[in-house]
Image (cartoon, coloured by chain):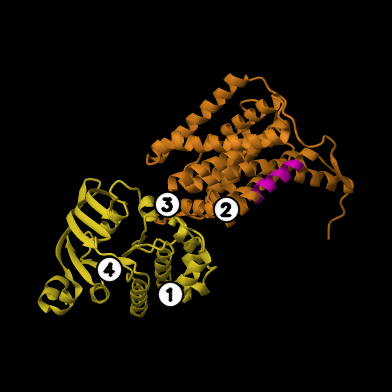
Chain colours: A yellow, B orange
Amino acid sequence: MSPLLEVQGLDAYYGRVKALDGVTFSLAAGGITTILGANGAGKTTTLRAISRMVRTEGQIRFAGEPIETCSTEEVVRRGVAHAPEGRGTFAQLTVEENLRLGAWGRRDRAGLEQEFARVFGYFPALQVRRKQQAGTLSGGEQQMLAVARALMLRPRLLLMDEPSLGLAPLIVQEIFRILRAVNAETGVAILLVEQNAALALDLADHVFLMETGRVVMEGPSGLLRRDDSIRKAYLGY
Amino acid sequence: MWPPVSYHLMDIFIQQVVSGLATGSIYAALALALVMIYEATDVVNFAQGEMAMFATYICWAMLSAGVPYWGAFCGTLAIAFIGGLLIERIVIRPVENAPILTIVIITIGLLEIFNSLAGWIFSYVQKPFPSPFPKEPVRFGEIVIGSHELGQIGVTLAVLACIFVFFRFTPLGLAMRAAAQNPVSSRLVGIRVGWMLALGWGLAAMFGAVAGVMIAPIVFLEPNMMGGIQIYAFAAATLGGFTSPVGAVVGGLIVGVVENLVGTYVSFIGTELKLTVALAIIIIVLLVKPSGLFGRAVVRRV
């Protein structure tokens, strides 16, 4: 089966600064892959390259189709949902309005109420706060809203950028549990950028490490979890 | 308890207030156009008044060709909408990432272009413009209020109600609000932010057209008719807070009422210095509370 996402020789630029150098990887449909690495390694830039938020050179194929010349909106309409760094919540709109906007990119927008039901099933806390202004939610709830909004698209690929950032450990565990459930039940592929390596390795099947814009190591997550020397060398624990 | 005041003085006061609300609703419509574009793009469209004036001329042209009033009114709104949309796509879009000053200068350029275009096509001679409302005033007991003034308030309220419903309850309105508040996140949910901006310009041009068509019967149609009104609209938007649509409307009504009351009751202001009142309001607001009554104070970390 051909991979859902293929990236080959990807360079990315912020102005004249080269942030990614020859990044190459692929992601199978329904799989969970995590990108690990220190700050500034290029993890977020990789996600932004896929969402077409940054200038790139090289090849990106999604579901077999090249997307390098697509706009962000087109990539979203093809089924790529991106929960960005910092949640990207529409703070002045209500929770319900945020979710409605999540479904904007869908070609078939009928049955919105069913989508709400599905998403509230995963995140009951959001249902309670349905009419509340999103900016007044706690950090954990805003992260849940970011994931829920992405799920409203019924995406084939979910890009998650540092969901654990600034959140209490219990909440982070809950969110990761829900991500696992969503992947199992809907088959959505997840590309996860994380600093919390332990949790990320627990969730993902596949991992690759980045350093200064390059992929330096790649493999099944089990390998990294079990092999002490590799883990100590690259992740420091 | 009211102090003992003769009914006659009270009547005059109420009439002045209603008159102020009527002109205030014109300022509110134009201020709303300014605020809409500012909220979405951080740009003050200095050409808003002239675009409104030009739309009014188009209405006049339709009326002269025999189109019935409300047909011409709706036709003008449609043409203004399309015109505003096209201006955003063709003139503003190429410079959307330029410094603010560049875009401001372009809007000032548009101001000059529309003004001269109107004078060239339609001449600078003042023309009368019809009002759709009856000439007989309406009586509430001892109080007499012009039908056109009531009509101005009514039409403005109707337009505002439609806009409120549009933004609050329709998917497109929601997408436009989102695009104005957070363009990056909007792109990430698949909203074409550029087109939302174009729609915003279209709607703003439509409000301007409403303002122009409603005020033309009173100030007569000529290329410079919106100059003073534009300044009042700026005062209204400044007073209300440039980031608040509610503020624009409230500000417009307040400016209209204050202008009228000050002009009537403060003898040295009279009618000649009424515009000065508007400018004074702008300066006072910017000195005392720059974010206006309803605006958000912006804190920028440098």
Q: Is residue A209 left or right of residue B137?
A: left
Q: Secondary structure at mark 1?
A: helix
* Mark 3 lies on residue: B183
Q: CA distance from mark 3 to mark 1?
A: 27 Å
* Mark 1 lies on residue: A122
Q: Please name whichever residue, A184 or B84, is drawn nearer the observer in this view of the structure.
A: A184
Are labels 2 and 4 on one chain?
no
Which chain is indicated by disc 4?
A
Q: Is residue A192 left or right of residue B88?
A: left
Which marked residue is nearer to the observer: mark 2 or mark 4? 4
- Are there few (<14), some (14-19), or many (20+) residues within 10 Å of tag 2? some
Which chain is indicated by disc 2?
B
Could you tell me if the residues under marks 2 and 4 are in contact, i.e. CB atoms within 8 Å? no
- From this viewpoint, which residue is outermost toward the front? A1
What amino acid type should be assigned to the residue bearing mark 4?
Gly
Q: Residue at x 50, y 48 (%)?
A: B39
* Mark 2 lies on residue: B167
What amino acid type should be assigned to the residue bearing mark 2?
Phe
Quarter occupied by residue A147? bottom left
Q: Which residues are magenta?
A: B151-161
Could you tell me if the residues under marks 3 and 1 are in contact, i.e. CB atoms within 8 Å? no
Q: CA distance from mark 2 to mark 3?
A: 17 Å
Q: Secondary structure at mark 2?
A: helix
Where residue B264 appears, x then y in whole percent? 76, 39
Quarter occupied by residue A62? bottom left
